[in-house]
Structure formats: C-alpha cells, structure tokens
Image: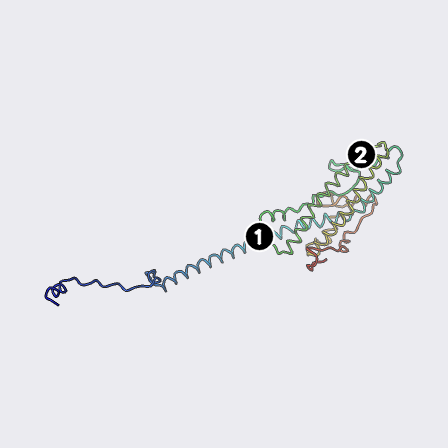
Amino acid sequence: MNEAEQISAVTAPAAEPQPARRSRWQRFSPSMGWPAFWSEILIVVLGVVIALAANEAVEDWNWRNKVKDAEARLQGDIAWVFLWSAEKSVTQPCVDAQLSAMSRNVLDSGDTLQPLPVGTALDRQWVVRMPTRPYRFPTWEALLADGTASHFPPQRQAILGRISHDMVQARAYEAESRGLDGALLVMRDPIALDPVVRADLLTNINRLRSLWGNERLYARQRMRLIADAGMAPSEAAVELFLNADGKQPSGSNFSGAVPDCRKQQLPLGDWRDYRDVVFTVGAPGEGQTK
C-alpha cells in the first residue's frame, strides 16, 4: 500500500454499525412485553365473559319471575274456563230437551204455529234457555304478546295453547248459537206455517241441537285437560258456581241456567262426566295420551 492509500484509509469515516435483524413477530412486540400484554388481554376477555354471563343470569332470573307471576295470574283464567265448561256440559241435556220439544211443536202445529213462552233477563229475550259466557283467556294472549309464553316449559305451552285455541273456537260457537237463538225467536208468535217456513224452523232447531252436542264434547275435553294438568278448581267451587239450588244470584259469578232447568224439571248432566273423555295433547305418539 502506497503512502496515499494509507492516508485515505486513516482519514475515511468509520462505517456505522448495522442494527441487528429482528423477526416480523419481534417488530410488533408491545412495549410492556408479551407476558404483560397477554395478561391484559386475558383480563379483558374474562371481564367480558363474566359480564355476559351475569347479564344472561339476570335476564334468566327476570324471565323466571315473569313466568312465576304469569302462572299465578293464569290460575284465575283457567278456573273460569273449567267452570264455564262444566256449565256447558251440565246444561246441554236441558237445551237439547227444549229444542226437541220445539221440533215437536213445529211438526204438530197446523197451519199456525203454537207460540212458545219467552224468557227475559237483562233486557235479553230467548225461547231457548241456555247459558251465555264470554269464553275468554286473556292472560295467555297477553303472555304471547310480550314474549313470556315462550319461556314456559314446552308441555305447559302445549296445554295453555290448547286451552287458548279452544276459547277462540268456543267464542265462535257462542256467536253462532246466539244467532240461531235469535232466529228462533220468531216462534214466540203465532206465525203461519207452510212447508218452507216449517222446514226453515226445523233446520235452525237441528243446527242448534248439533252445535250444542258438539260443544258438550269439547267442554268435557277442556275439563279433562285442565284436571289432568292439576289445575281444576275444587268440587265445592264447581258446585257453588253451578248453583243448582238457585240460592246464589245468577250472573257472571253463578249459573242461572242450571237452576232454571231444574225448576222446569228438564234433564241436567253430571259435570264429572269429563272423566270418561279420552283425548290426546300434542302429536300422536308423544306419550301424552289421556
């Protein structure tokens, strides 16, 4: 090496040291270090899990309380369904006997119908004495609307849903019965009878007889369903409502049709006959046959 090269080597700046090469994972290493970082993450995750579990537990507790409160409110509605159904079952033979007599009157009358006596109560008139009830199940309908019903056990939902459906059908039958009863009010007058009028009267009478025969079966099915679920009122409560001796004022709390039928010496059924009815709740083969 000549003198010039030596001088150049001495005076040249020293090369800067190169930083050590880091892996891609190390480049993103948190300042606190990975152990502390994962500790923080674990704490956050556990906090979220605990919060979600606590929220779910509170929500489940709230639904349980709502279901418990709903069960208490449902008992009153279920008791009324049983009592109304018992009244329907007991009075069906009485209604059928009246309608049978009306048919004979139509057939035996000559050119002019022999008028029927008219009953009156609460500004309502009738030629057939039969009970009138609202057939409502409002609590379950409200529970369906606010979502509480879905938190009942499945079997309980099936039973209450069946009762609710039956009440809808019973209201439809009640409306049809009232319509036929209103049409038969014409028999309070000595109307002229020709073959067309006679046939029309007999048609309405027999429609009402058939309707009430079917309704008695449905009423006893409802009673059996409620009794098998352990929700039926006591026998004393049923007897008090039916009011067979007529000691209680007739109306919404006590039957007026049952004592009236007894006064007229018309036949009455036994509300306990529901025990002879066989039916199935739910789909066949689910082991719920009654």
Residue 167 vs 30, above or below: the answer is above
The one nearer the camera, 103 or 24, is 24
Q: Quadrant of residue 94?
A: top right
- The single residue placed furthest to the front in the displayed view is 2
* x and y, in percent, of residue 230 in the image: 68, 56
* x and y, in percent, of residue 251 in the image: 72, 42
Amino acid at circle 1: Lys
- What is the quadrant of the N terminus in the image? bottom left
Whole-Å distance between the Cαs marked 2 and 1?
A: 51 Å
Q: Is residue 78 left or right of residue 47?
A: right
**Disc 2 residue crowd, few under 14, some 14–19, many 20+, Cα 10 Å:** some
Q: Nearer the viewer, mark 2 or mark 1?
A: 2
* x and y, in percent, of residue 238 in the image: 73, 51
* x and y, in percent, of residue 118 in the image: 80, 36
- The single residue placed furthest to the left in the displayed view is 3
Residue 201 vs 228, above or below: the answer is above
Q: Is residue 116 left or right of residue 53?
A: right
**Disc 1 residue crowd, few under 14, some 14–19, many 20+, Cα 10 Å:** some
Mark 1 or mark 2, which is nearer the start of the sequence? Answer: 1
Amino acid at circle 2: Val
Residue 285 vs 85, above or below: the answer is below
Q: Secondary structure at mark 2?
A: helix
- List the residue tagged with mark 1: 66
**Residue displayed at 87% across by 38% down:** 107
Coloration of the structure image: rainbow
Q: Are marks 2 and 1 in contact (CB under 8 Å)?
A: no
Q: Secondary structure at mark 1?
A: helix
**Residue displayed at 66% across by 47% down:** 137
**Residue displayed at 25% across by 63% down:** 18
Q: Is residue 146 left or right of residue 226?
A: left
- List the residue tagged with mark 2: 186
